[in-house]
Amino acid sequence: MAPKVLMVAEKPSIAHSIASVLSGGQMSTRRGSTEVHEFDGTFLGFSAHYKVTSVIGHVFSVDFPAAFQDWTVTDPLDLFQAPVLKTESNPKAHIRRHLSQEARGSSHLVLWLDCDREGENICFEVIECTGFNVKEGRRVYRARFSSVTEKDITKAMSNLVEPNKDESLAVDARQEIDLKVGVAFTRFQTNYFQGKYGNLDSRVISYGPCQTPTLGFCVQRYLQISTFKPEKFWAVHPYIIHHGYELKLEWERNKLFDSNVSEMFQKLIMEDGVVEVTGISEKHESKTRPSGLNTVNLLKVASSALGFGPQLAMQLAERLYTQGFISYPRTESTAYPSSFEFRGILGALVSSQAWGSYAQSLLTDGYVKPRSGTDAGDHPPITPIRSASEDMLGSDPWRLYQYICQHFLGSVSPDCKFVRTTIEFSTGGEFFHCVGQRVTIKGYTCIMPWLAVNENNLPQFTKGEKVKISKVDLYEGETVAPDYLSESELISLMEKNGIGTDASIAVHINNICERNYVQVQTGRKLVPTALGISLIRGYQCIDPDLCLPDIRSFIEQQITLVAKGQADHSLVVQHVIQQFKRKFSYFVKQIDNMDALFEAQFSPLSDSGRLLSKCGKCLRYMKFISTQPSRLFCGTCEEVYYVPQKGSIKLYKELTCPLDNFELLIFSFPGPEGKTFPFCPYCYNSPPFEGIETLFGASKAGGSGQLGKGAGMPCFLCPHPTCQHSLIAQGVCACPECNGTLVLDPVSAPKWRLYCNMCNCLVFLPEGAHRITTTVERCVECDSTIIEVDFNKKTTPLKDGTTLYSGCILCDELLHSLVEMKYGKSFSKRNGGRGRMRGRGRGGRGRGGRKPEDPKMSFRGF
C-alpha cells in the first residue's frame, strides 16, 4: 500500500495551486473545513498518495484562562503572572478537527506555510493538530518558497527542509508579551477613564507595546506643530534677461531674518545694475535606479502615491500573491539573490499591453544588473510573476500590481543620467547663481516617469560677461511648521526605530485609527485626536518609556535572538514581563497625573448624555451616553451600565424587569431587516442565570475577555419563567437553521416577524395585523407555541370576516401560507449554534418536530 503524504498550506488558494502543479491538474477535490485535493504521485523516490489541504491563517490564538477573563474580578496586575493558553482561533471553522481527520493514516507531513516567522509558528500549530509531534515514525518536512509558480513549487518540493522551532518560539514570545502587557494596561485604563468621562468616543482605551509608540510619533509631530512660532524672513532675487530667457538668480545667503539688512542689500544690487558671470561649471550626474522592492517601501508608496492605507495595501498584495501574480509580499530584503532569473520574469511581462514593449527592449538590448540592496535572509524582493490586465484584476489591485511591475522593470533598467550646469554671478559684492539640467539618458525614468529629472535649459554664458539686471525683488516669507505625519513618513519612523515588522506595521497603524487615537485626513495625514494626545502626554508625565520606541526596539532585538537560537524563549519573556510589571505598578500609583489631563479635556459622566430610563436601585433617571462605548450612567448610584453597541436604543414602553426593577430598553440594529430586542441594563451587565452564553457582550475588549463573566444577556436569551419578555414567553419554535429559537419581535408592527436568537434567520408573519402575541398554549403536533393574530378587518384572510385567529405557524395551513422566511443582515450565519436555550422544550422534536420531507416544514422562500 502506497504511503500517504499530507500537505498543508496557509490558504485554500495556495493549496489549490500546489496541488495543481504537483498533480499536473489530475486531481480530485472534496469539501471539508477547507478543500482537500487528492492525487497519486511520487514522493522522495517512491509512489505515494497525496492529500493537499490548508488552514486559514493561525489555527490558535493566545489568551488567558477563563478564571482571568472577568474584568470586574481580576486585578490587571495579576495578569503579568497569569498562565496563558492557546485556543482555537475560529472554533466554528473546525480547522483543528479537520487536520486531525485528514492526518489519519498519513506517514509524512509537508508544511507549505508562508516563509516568515508567523508561518513557522503556524507550522508547529499544524504539527500539533495532526498529532505528528507525538507519534514516532512520522516525518515532518518544510517547503520554502516565495511564489506559487510551477517552477518555485517544484523547486521547493525538491529541497524540503525541517521547520524552524526557534522562529516559532520567537512568535510565541511576542504573543505572550503583547497579550499580558497590552491587556493589563488596557483593562486598567478602560475601567478607570470610561468610569469617569462621557465623551471619550472610544470603545476601549487600549495600550500596546507597538501601538502606543506608533501613536507617540504622531503626537510628537502634533506637539511640534502646536508649539511652532513662525518667523519672517527676506530674500533678494535679481532678474536678468539673456538671449530671450528671463532668469531668476538665487542668493548665496539664501535668506535673512532682518528686514533692514535685506533692504540694504537690495539697494546695493539695484545701484550696481549689472551682474558679472564669475563661474561656469558642468557636472555629469546620475539618478540611481531603485533597488528591489520590500514590504515597507511598498506600503510607503501605496500610501503616498496610490492613496491606499497600509492595511488595504497589504490585503491587495496578499490577494495578488495568492492569485499567482506577484511573489510573496512580506519581505525585508531589497537585494535579489544571485540565482534570481530576471530573464524569465521579463519574458512573462512581454505580453503586457502596458509595458510589454519596454520589457522586450530590456531583453533585446540587455537588462542592467540591479543595485545591491539589503539581504535580510527571508524572501527575495517583491516582483511580478506573470502578466495581468486591469480587466483581470480590478481597479485597486491593478494599480498596486502596476507599480510592482514598474518598480521591477525600473530596477533592471539603466540609471538616469543628466548634466547639471551652474552659472555663478556677482553684483554689489553679493553672489548669486542659477542652475540648469539636461537629461542625456532617461534610463529607468522611462518606466517610472514620476521620478524623472526636471529639465531646465539655460542660455549660453561666457565667464566675465556682464548682463543688465532687469529688476530686483525682495521676497518676504515666513517659516512654516512641519505638516502632520503622513502614513508614509510614519512607516519610515517605525522601520527606523524597530517598531513592528513587515508583517505587523500595517496592523499597528490601523489600530490607532480604529481606536480613534488618530484620524486620517487629506493626503493620508495622521492627525491625533484629543484622546490620542491626552494618552501620550499622560505617559510622558508618568513614564516616558511607555510611549517611546526604545523598549519595543529592545524587545524586538531579544525576540530576534530567540529566532536565531541565541536566547532562551522563556527567559526573554520572563525578563520583559517583569520590567513591564514594575512599570505598570508605578503607572497605577501615578494615574492622577494622566487623569488631570483627561479632566481638562473631557466631560464627566454626570455632565454627559441625556436622560433615558430609571435605575432599579434608586428609581432616579439614568443618562444615556451615545459616544463609544454606548452606556448608561446613574449619577445617584455612580454606576455605569454598558449596552449593546452599533445600533439605536430607546425606552420600551416604561416596562420594568421583574428581577431588578430596571426599566427595559429596546435595541435595534441598523437597516430595514435589523433585529430588535428588549433588554434590561442590569441583567445585560450582570446575567442572573448561569450558563447563558454571551452573544452581544458589552465588550470592552482590550485583547481579551468581556466586561464581566457572562455579560451581555438580552431578554431573548433569558429563561425567566414568568417574565413576559423572556425567551420562555416570547419564543415560538426552534430555528430551522441552527440550535436557536425563533422569538417574536415585540415592536415590529405592522410588519410583524420572528427572529432567531442565535443566527440571522428571519420569519415574516402576516402583514397588516393589528396585533400578534404568543400564548401559553402549545401545538400538540410539534410542541411550538401557539400565536394569536388579530387581522385587519379590511384584509382579513378569514372567510367568515372575523379577525381573531390562533394557531401554529408550522402546522396550521392558513398561518403557514402567510409566513415567509429569509435571512437578515444583522447576524452572519457563522454566529449560529451558540447555546441551546430553547425554552420549555419548544421544537422538542428537532427543528420543528416534523420530518424534513413534510411540506409544512418548508417556509416559503426557504
Image: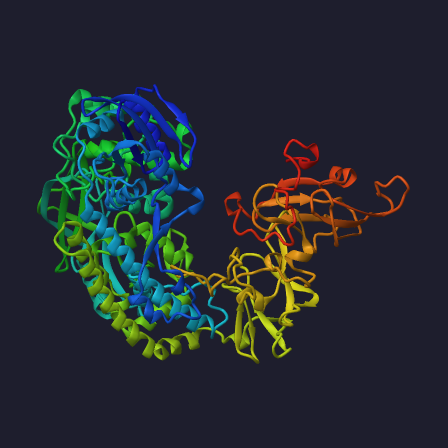
Residue 190: x and y, percent?
42, 68
Which residue in the rendered view is the most extreme toward the right?
Answer: 800
Between 606 and 8, the one nearer to me in the picture = 8
Residue 77: x and y, percent?
33, 71
Q: Quadrant of residue 534?
A: bottom left
Instruction: Report the colour scheme.
Output: rainbow
354 displayed left or right of 331: right
Q: Quadrant of residue 725?
A: bottom right
Between 351 and 800, the one nearer to me in the picture = 800
Q: Is residue 158 above or below residue 308?
A: above
Between 687 and 366, the one nearer to me in the picture = 687
Q: Quadrant of the C terminus?
A: top right
The answer to whether residue 306 shows anywhere in this view is no
The answer to whether residue 159 shows anywhere in this view is yes
Q: Residue at x 27, y 22 (%)?
A: 1
Q: Residue at x 54, y 57 (%)?
A: 646
Between 644 and 684, the one nearer to me in the picture = 684
Q: Is residue 638 above or below residue 740?
A: below
380 displayed left or right of 326: left
Residue 87: x and y, percent?
36, 52
Residue 225: x and y, percent?
32, 65
Total numbered labels placed on residues in the image = 0
136 displayed left or right of 130: left
Q: Is residue 173 above or below residue 444?
A: below
